[in-house]
Structure formats: C-alpha cells, structure tokens
C-alpha cells in the first residue's frame, strides 16, 4: 500500500483532479439518492387467496385449502405452509427460504394451482407475494357530499388517474364504500311466456354493448375507420336489450326489462372506513420498487388542491405518510453526523494544535463519506435510516487512518526531516498497520452473510455502507492526505523539532529492577541517563500526556502477571454483569404511529363490529395528543392475507401529535378498552421495528379439533398469567351457528336431481348467479341473476322449490335433503398440514428476553391433553434466531480478524495478544448499556460485531511499532516503552474522535433513527473506551510475557515462523 502513496506524491496534480471528481460525484449522489424509511425487503412469503362464495369453513378447508396446500408443499425452497379456512375464504401462506426468487416461486405456484381439479365452482385463487414495496407509502382519506357512490365514481374516474400519473406510483387502491352490482331479478312467469332460457341471458350480455373495429372506408380524401356497435352506458339501455326468442315466439321484440327488473344496487359491504369519525374513502398509494417515497409525497401534496376540486365539496386528509418521518430521520441523523464531525475535528485540533494539520486530517471525513455515497448511488441503494445511520457511525472511524498518517508525518517533521523525506518515510512506517486495521474493521461484516431472515436483509446495506466508507478512508489516508500534507505543511513543524532541547534517555525500572530508557526533554538528565543515538525517535521530548501514562505503564511492566490476573478478574465481573442486561429484538421506531386491532367474537356481523369500533373511537376523539385517526372495519382485497381482517375485525391507524410521545396515549386506550368488555379484544402496538409484529406467541398443535380447542384454552390461561404479557388472545375460532344441507342422493336421483344440481340451485337462490360484467360509463359492474326473494331462514330454505315434479307440483329442498342448524367453527387453521392454534400476547416491558424466558417456562410446565404440543414463536423466536446467527457471525468475525493479524505479523501467538482487546471491549459495552438502562438487541449486537474490528486497530498500530523498534535493536522492555509512548497520542486521538463523534447519536439529541443508532453507538462508545484503556496497559503486559517466553525458547525479534 505504500506504493499507492508514492504514486500519488509523484502525480500530485492527477491526485488533486481525482479528488475533485470524487467530490463532485459524491455531491451528485447526495442529490439523487432515493430516500426511504428502511431498505426495501422482499419478504419470502406468498399468499394463495381463494374466494369461495357461500362455502362454510369446513367445506373451504376440504375442497380448497387442502388441495392448495398439497400443490404448494412441493415447490422449491418452501420452509413452512400455514392456512386459514373461513366462511367463503381460503388463505394459504407459503414461507420460503430467504434468497429464493419470489417471481419464479409465484409462477411455479400458479402453474401448480392450474393443475388442480375439482375446485368448487366460482373458486378464484390469486397468488400474491409480499414485500415492503407492496405496502402503501401514503394513505389518504377523502370525504365529500352525502352520496358515497357518487364520490366513489368521481374518485375512480378522476382522482385515481391523477395520482397514478405521479412518477413512481405503481397503483392506487380505493376502499371504504361497497361497489355497485347490476341485479337482474327474473319474473319466472314472464320468462316462461317469452320462452327464453336463462342461459340465453349470458349470451345476451356477451354479444351486446361492445364496439367492434370493422375496417376502414374512404371519403375520397381520408381513410375513415369503421366501428360497429356502442357501449352500454345506463341501466335503461341494458333493460332495453332485445332477447333472443324461439321461432314460435311473437313477432314483437321482447326486452330484458320485460321479463326482469334490472336495477343497480350496492353490493354486500365487506369494509367500512372513517377518518376522525367521518365516513370516508381510503386511498392507498403504492409505489414502484424504484419509486422515490419523498418525491411522490411532495408531488401528491402539490396535487391535493386539484384533487379536492375534482370532487365537489371534496376534502382530503393524509392519514399516514412515510415521507415526513423519512425526512425527519434523515435530517436528524445528518445533524447528529455533523455534530459528530465537529467533535472529531475538535479532538484532532486539541491534540495537534495546528490548524493546517487539523484541516488536512479533517478533509478525510467528508471525502470518505462522499465516496461511500457515490458507491451507494452506483450500487442502486437508497438513503434510509440504516444506510444513513451507517454513515453517521462511520464519521468517527473514517478519520482514524488519516490521524495515524498525519500524526506520524508531523512527528517525522519534528525530528528535523524535510517534507520530501518525512512524508514517504512516515507513510511507509504506518502503511501496513493502517491497512491491516482497516481490513480488520471491515472484514467483521463478512459474516453478516451468515445472518438470515429479516435482520440479515435489513443490515446488509448497513454493513456495505460502513465498508465502503472505511475503504474510502484508507484510500484517502494513503493517497490524498500525503499530497495535502506536502502542499500545506510548512517548515514550522520541522523547526519545532530542530529547536527542541537536547534529549536524553531516562531509565524506567523494568520487571527485574533494571533501568529502561525513557526520554527527558529538559536540559537536565534523569539519574542513570544515557544518550540514545541508535533510534532517532528517542530524541523526542516527553509530552505531558506521556508523562501521565508512563508511570502506569512502568507499574504494569514490572508486574505483568498481576496485571493479567486483574484483567481476568475484570472479565469475570463483566460476564456476571451481562446477566443483568435486558434484551429486546429491534425496538420501537418511534414513528409516532399507533396500530390498534379490535377483534370481536367470530360470527359478529359487520354492523355490530362497526358499532363497537365507533365506541372505541370515542377514546381517540378530541385528545390533544392525537393528530388524526382512521378506522377500517372488515377487510377487502387480497392484501388481507398479510394484514388479517374479517367482518369481526377493525383496524385503527392513529397518528400522534408528536413522534415518540405515545406512552400516555397507549395507556389511555388500554384502560378505556379494559373498562368496556363489549369492545372485544383490543391490542395496541406502537410503531414497532421494521420487521413488523412485536407480539410473542405460543403455537399449539393437536391431532383433532377437540384436543386443539382444549389445549389452546389451557395454554391461553397459562400465558395470561405470565408477568410482562397482556392482550392474550388465541385464534381458535368460536363455534357459530351454521346451516348444513345434507342431500339424500337416492331421493334426489329418483326425482331427476343430483347433489351438484341441488347445491347449484341453493346457491343460486341464496346469492344469485353471476352472469358476467357490464361497463357503465367506463366502470365495470358485475351482473347477478336472481330468481325471486332469497330464503331468509331455515324454514324458508327447506321450502325452496328446486324443480317441477311429475305432476307439476314443485319439488322442495326438504324432499331431497335434511336442512339443519349446527355449531361449527368460523375458521380452521393448519401449519404444514397439522391443525394449529396460535396464542398471542403483547409484551409490556422492554425486556423481551425476560418475557420469553417466563413464557418458555410456562410452556414447559403446562400439562396439555395427550397428543397436543406447544412451542414459543413470534418475536421471541425471531429474537432467538437473530441472536444465534449474530453470535455465530461474531465468532466468525473474530476468526477472520485473527487470520488478518496472522498474515500481518507472521506469527500465531502475537495476534493473540492483540485479540485480547476484544473481550475487554465487551466490558465497557455491557457497563454502558447497564448504566443507560438500554436493552441488548439486534442493533447492539451489530455494534459488538463492529467493535471486533475497531478495537484491534489500536493494538495493531501499537504492536507494529514495537516490533519495528525491536528489529532496530531495542530490548523487549525498551521497545514496548518507546512504542507505547509514541503510539499513545494517535491511539487516544482516534479513540476520542470516534467516541465524541458518536456522542450525539448515543444521546439521541435529535431522535432520528434512535431505535437503531442509539444502542449501536452506546455499545461502540463503551467498548472502545474500555478496550483503549486496557489496550494501553494489558496488551503491553501480555506482549512482555509472550516475548520473554519466546526468548527463552531461542526466538529472536526477527524470527516469526509459527510463533
């Protein structure tokens, strides 16, 4: 790497030009990088959502869910398959291994489903995948006028196209008002008189109301296109369609309106939406994978007045928008980074006491960060709280290499060398050390490839950003800093060295009581002083900092064994203290958004759920800490497979007035709900981390429904007693009244019917028959055929006429089937083919580890019915998996660092001395987490991973110089003293620069991205402080013991080999 600095010094103009290019490229990257909340993650999850109109949960499971499970279980990379079968709906969730191609898996699943036979008529499976990009970035409400259908029509016709015209918008979803359907209510007598078959009505719709391009004609001058037909634009036109009649029919045409009543009606309502208590439409904006969230938000803000003018008396309100939180987080983290930069520069100035030296050193910070930003832009990454947090963390580290280089250049200048002599010599002396230390710092991120799941997906951009910044800092330190030093450092630094007082060498007693050399700057020599001519650096005066350090170093070198034993005792105490740490997963993002889920008993109607939701809204109305809230009652759309929902569910999105200040609001909502049992089960979750749910779960499996219900009941009661867990619910559906029609096949056959025909006739009577779709004014409406009034109760259903009997009398349903009411589950859940139930609870403390431990104990101690099993899942399982993988990554990072050190020092034993810095880093990290009462989470573990590479850098630059002194002929003791005192200043400078640069993040002065950056910064600060102090004391003691042992075995200073 020294050759790189030689090349840059020889080509200074080219180096300057390259620097300008890099700065311009970095500034361009800053202005064009897309900004997101978190990196876009493709969840390895597919949902197969199948609508089965009119089917009960048991039928859905038997006829749809089980075949779907069988179809997807054989796909490549399938990790887990879960399913829920409920009234008219089957949801099969397929979890794949991370790294699998979701698009290919989706295509494979669609092909497998196409091969399924005997699915019920009307079953319509949809295969959907989930990623961060599939969820709305902005959610708006629109209210206006009393006619919701008119509002819906205007929104779809004008508002949606306008929003979809914004660059980066993929789709706009509208919900909150039921669609309208065209109902054709047949009059059976008129139908018979007209001699028209019902099947002819389908043909009627398919052959009318369409425009057919027929070709072109010429008018002599122009070619004119010919179009035959015109679209149907009204109900009246549809009713006036002439029916196809038989040849014996009367000559006058018979229209559809002659035999049926044609009306436009509201479809069955599946969801309702209100904003701040006012009925509204919900408009959800989904961006493309490469869309810019902030830019879309700004464009939509500009467009809102136009949108309101499109809808008469329309009023829009933004309920949820990621952009302000993104901008606030970016701004806050950038502010903390700038404060950190200022602190780091201040440290450099206080140590070097030179404006020129400080500026030459400080230029490495913005330049390294700009190069990293250019790398992010080139790699297609985004600026989010993870990558920006990485850049902020890197502020204190990127200056390290430059500090070591510039400090060594300045030291050589003070020794009397010219710039031409000092700069190459100084860079050559530290090039290996700074290269090895930087490689050790970035190499620790390689094992992140071993971390799977959402944690790995989230933190890989973080690791890559830090890596790019650190490698950029190495490049800057070895190329640009030497050139800047050549241009801006003058002879004043060299003159300071020339005019220094004659230096003599004072002796420091070593472990054997003999005297070892120590430089004295005064004109009077210490007792027993000898002038050192062999090592030029020994003529340097002792600084005040060194004067404070050398007595402690002397004590350590006289008592190396005692020092090491004290270090071991300190490690033991740290290990004991680690047991006092709280643990969590990723933490609360502090976005100021609450999500409330309200669940009523299975079978609750949408109207009843809506009434309960209105009651719960009273807890939010008029509160000063609530900016806005929106409630969606029920659910619609395939995305419900990921978000849950149903007629008995309501979901609230609450935006707090101030981000991060939601504790009082959460407490109020919970107390309000607890005092009103009729509201059902209400769970409140704050803006949890980017991985979604923060609930702990217990998954129960059983061989049959009865055993499952009993086991789930027992486990729900047990979990309810766990300290630190509340809002305990299980997903075992309650039994609800269900009507079962059991067809007697023999009786049906005798009357000319079969089971399928009876089922079709009953379905047609209850919900009508879908004939197709007709577009009225560009809006597609489903056309449903009905024949009379649908049966309203069991008696009416039993008396339903199916067909005409032999004597003309109608055959009723009760003649061919038994119609009875039974109790059946509203939904059925399975995991990998086995019947399951999930008990969920919300942790009430920030110590997830304690809750998990208590939950695990309860599971192990609870006796379940024979055949039933239970295991802990949810966020507890996520935490255990992440901690296990990060622990393995930590061990691999230590191994990689050790390998780099072995390659650097050519020894197996010397690197072990350096590696002792790592466990002592944990001492400070644990201590600071305990003092600040912060839990150990994933971000903290990433901080520990970073420390592995950071803390050994100090030991590297120290031992590297000690070895250089020994190769020049100094004794072990003298080499340690000289190396330690000469590396004292750069070691403390780099450590303080890093610590102070991270102080704004650790204190969370602005709050942006604090749930990740704050614990990470605390761990690095604590670990770096303890490891730096102990590196300067314990590493010299261990080195002394090791090298003396090697000497006894006959190894010289230059002999490395195996040891």
Image (spheres, helix red, strand yellow):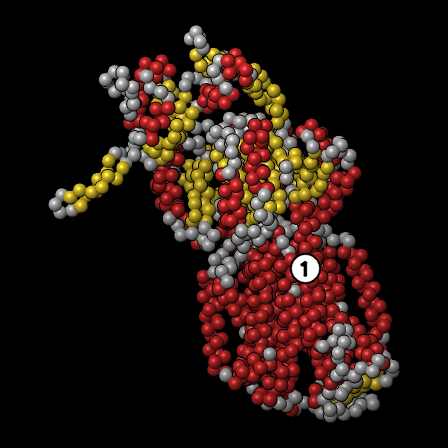
Towards the viewer: 740 or 16: 740
Q: Judge whether 295 appears above or below 997 on screen.
A: above
Quick one: which residue is furthest to the top in this view? 807
719 left or right of 236 in image: right
* Image quadrant where one finds the C terminus: bottom right
Residue beneath the point at 62% across and 43% down: 80
Q: Which quarter of the picture shows residue 535?
A: bottom right
Q: Which quarter of the picture shows residue 889?
A: bottom right
Residue matched to label 1: 889
403 left or right of 174 in image: right
Residue beneath the point at 56% across and 63% down: 465
Q: Which quarter of the picture shows residue 678?
A: top right
Towards the viewer: 995 or 980: 980
Q: Judge whether 100 appears above or below 62 on screen.
A: below
Residue beneath the point at 58% across and 55% down: 458
Q: Judge whether 1012 appears above or below 257 on screen.
A: below
601 left or right of 969 in image: left
Quick one: which residue is furthest to the right in this view? 513
* Image quadrant where one finds the N terminus: bottom right
Q: Judge whether 8 appears above or below 153 on screen.
A: below
Where is residue 773 drawn, in percent x and y? 37, 31
Towards the viewer: 541 or 828: 828
Mark 1: secondary structure = helix
Category of crowding for the residue at label 1, using alpha-carbon neighbours closer than 10 angstroms: few (below 14), some (14–19), many (at least 20): many
Residue beneath the point at 72% across and 77% down: 906
Where is residue 135 drawn, in percent x and y? 51, 46
Kindly tell me whether residue 407 is visible in this rendering: no
Towards the viewer: 541 or 768: 768
Where is residue 414 drawn, in percent x and y? 64, 87
Where is residue 174 drawn, in percent x and y? 44, 39
Quick one: which residue is furthest to the left in this view? 220
């Amino acid at each position: 790497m020294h050759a790189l600095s030689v090349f840059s010094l020889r080509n200074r103009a080219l180096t300057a030009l390259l620097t300008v290019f890099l700065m311009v490229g970095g500034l361009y990257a800053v202005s064009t990088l897309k900004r997101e909340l978190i990196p876009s993650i493709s969840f390895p999850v597919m949902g197969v959502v199948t609508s089965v109109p009119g089917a009960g949960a048991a039928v859905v499971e038997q006829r749809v869910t089980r075949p779907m499970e069988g179809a997807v279980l054989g796909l490549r990379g399938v990790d887990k398959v879960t399913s829920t079968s409920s009234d008219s709906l089957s949801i099969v969730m397929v979890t794949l291994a991370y790294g699998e191609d979701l698009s290919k898996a989706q295509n494979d699943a669609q092909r497998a489903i196409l091969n399924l036979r005997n699915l019920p008529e009307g079953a319509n499976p949809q295969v959907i995948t989930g990623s961060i990009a599939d969820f709305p970035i902005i959610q708006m409400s629109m209210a206006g006028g009393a006619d919701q259908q008119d509002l819906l029509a205007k929104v779809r016709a004008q508002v949606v196209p306008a929003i979809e015209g914004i660059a980066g918008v993929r789709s706009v979803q509208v919900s909150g008002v039921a669609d309208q359907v065209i109902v054709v209510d047949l009059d059976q007598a008129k139908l018979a008189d007209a001699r028209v078959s019902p099947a002819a009505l389908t043909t009627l719709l398919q052959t009318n109301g369409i425009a057919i391009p027929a070709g072109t004609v010429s008018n002599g001058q122009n070619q004119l296109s010919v179009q035959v037909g015109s679209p149907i634009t009204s109900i009246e036109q549809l009713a006036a369609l002439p029916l196809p009649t038989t040849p014996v029919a009367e000559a006058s045409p018979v229209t559809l309106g002659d035999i049926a009543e044609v009306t436009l009606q509201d479809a069955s309502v599946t969801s309702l939406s209100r904003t701040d208590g006012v009925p509204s439409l919900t408009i959800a904006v989904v961006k493309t994978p490469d869309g810019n969230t902030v830019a879309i938000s700004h464009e939509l803000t500009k467009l809102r007045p136009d949108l309101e003018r499109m809808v008469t008396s329309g009023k829009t309100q933004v309920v949820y928008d990621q952009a302000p939180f993104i901008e606030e987080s970016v701004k806050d983290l950038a502010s903390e980074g700038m404060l950190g930069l200022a602190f780091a520069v201040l440290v450099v100035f206080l140590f070097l006491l030179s404006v020129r030296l400080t500026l030459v050193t400080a230029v490495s910070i913005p330049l390294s960060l700009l190069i990293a930003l250019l790398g992010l832009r080139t790699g297609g990454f985004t600026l989010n709280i993870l990558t920006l947090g990485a850049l902020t963390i890197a502020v204190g580290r990127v200056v390290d290499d430059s500090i070591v280089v510039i400090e060594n250049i300045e030291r050589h200048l003070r020794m009397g060398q010219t710039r031409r002599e000092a700069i190459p010599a100084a860079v050559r002396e530290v090039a290996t050390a700074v290269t090895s230390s930087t490689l050790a710092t970035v190499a620790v991120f390689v094992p992140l490839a071993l971390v799977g799941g959402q944690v790995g997906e989230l933190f890989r951009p973080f690791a890559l950003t830090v890596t790019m910044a650190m490698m950029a800092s190495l490049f800057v330190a070895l190329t640009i800093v030497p050139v800047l030093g050549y241009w801006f450092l003058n002879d004043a630094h060299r003159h300071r060295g020339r005019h220094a007082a004659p230096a003599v060498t004072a002796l420091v007693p070593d472990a054997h009581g003999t005297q070892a050399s120590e430089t004295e700057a005064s004109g009077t020599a210490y007792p027993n002083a000898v002038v050192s001519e062999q090592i030029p650096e020994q003529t340097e005066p002792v600084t005040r900092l060194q004067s404070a350090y050398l007595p402690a170093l002397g004590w350590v070198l006289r008592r190396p064994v005692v020092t090491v034993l004290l270090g071991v005792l300190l490690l033991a105490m740290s290990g004991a203290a680690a047991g006092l740490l709280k643990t969590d997963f990723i933490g609360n993002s502090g976005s100021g958004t609450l999500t409330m889920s309200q669940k009523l008993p299975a079978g609750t109607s949408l109207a009843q759920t809506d009434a309960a939701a209105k009651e719960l809204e009273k807890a939010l109305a008029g509160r000063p800490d609530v900016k806005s809230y929106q409630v969606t009652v029920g659910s619609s759309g395939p995305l419900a497979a990921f978000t849950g929902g149903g007629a008995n569910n309501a979901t609230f999105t609450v935006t707090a007035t101030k981000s991060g200040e939601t504790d009082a609001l959460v407490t109020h909502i919970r107390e309000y709900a607890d005092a009103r049992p009729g509201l059902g089960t209400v769970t409140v979750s704050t803006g949890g981390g980017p991985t979604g749910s923060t609930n702990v779960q217990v998954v129960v499996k059983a061989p049959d429904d009865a055993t499952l219900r009993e086991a789930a009941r027992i486990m729900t009661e047990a979990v309810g007693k766990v300290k630190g867990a509340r809002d305990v619910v299980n997903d075992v559906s309650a039994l609800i009244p269900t009507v079962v029609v059991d067809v007697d096949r023999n009786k049906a056959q005798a009357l000319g019917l079969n089971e399928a025909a009876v089922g079709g006739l009953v379905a047609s009577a209850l919900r009508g028959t879908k004939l197709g779709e007709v577009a009225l004014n560009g809006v597609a409406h489903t056309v449903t055929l009905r024949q009379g009034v649908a049966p309203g109760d069991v008696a009416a259903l039993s008396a339903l006429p199916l067909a005409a009997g032999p004597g003309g009398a109608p055959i009723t349903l009760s003649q061919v089937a038994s119609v009875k009411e039974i109790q059946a589950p509203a939904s059925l859940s399975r995991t990998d083919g086995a019947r399951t139930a999930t008990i969920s609870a919300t942790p009430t403390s920030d110590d997830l580890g304690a809750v998990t431990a208590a939950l695990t104990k309860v599971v192990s101690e609870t006796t379940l019915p024979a055949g039933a099993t239970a295991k802990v899942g949810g966020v507890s399982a996520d935490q255990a998996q992440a901690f296990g993988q990060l622990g393995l990554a930590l061990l691999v990072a230590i191994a990689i660092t050790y390998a780099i050190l072995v390659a650097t020092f050519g020894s197996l034993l010397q690197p072990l001395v350096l590696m002792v810095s790592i466990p002592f880093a944990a001492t400070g990290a644990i201590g600071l987490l305990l003092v600040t009462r912060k839990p150990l989470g994933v971000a903290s573990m990433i901080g520990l991973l970073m420390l592995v590479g950071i803390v050994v850098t100090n030991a590297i630059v120290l031992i590297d110089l000690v070895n250089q002194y020994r190769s020049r002929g100094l004794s072990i003791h003298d080499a340690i003293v000289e190396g330690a005192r000469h590396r004292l200043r750069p070691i403390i400078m780099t450590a303080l620069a890093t610590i102070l640069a991270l102080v704004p993040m650790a204190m969370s002065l602005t709050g942006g991205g604090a749930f990740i950056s704050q614990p990470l910064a605390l761990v690095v600060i604590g670990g770096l402080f303890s490891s730096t102090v102990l590196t300067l004391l314990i590493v010299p003691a261990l080195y002394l013991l090791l090298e003396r042992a090697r000497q006894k075995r006959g190894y010289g200073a230059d002999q490395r080999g195996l040891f």
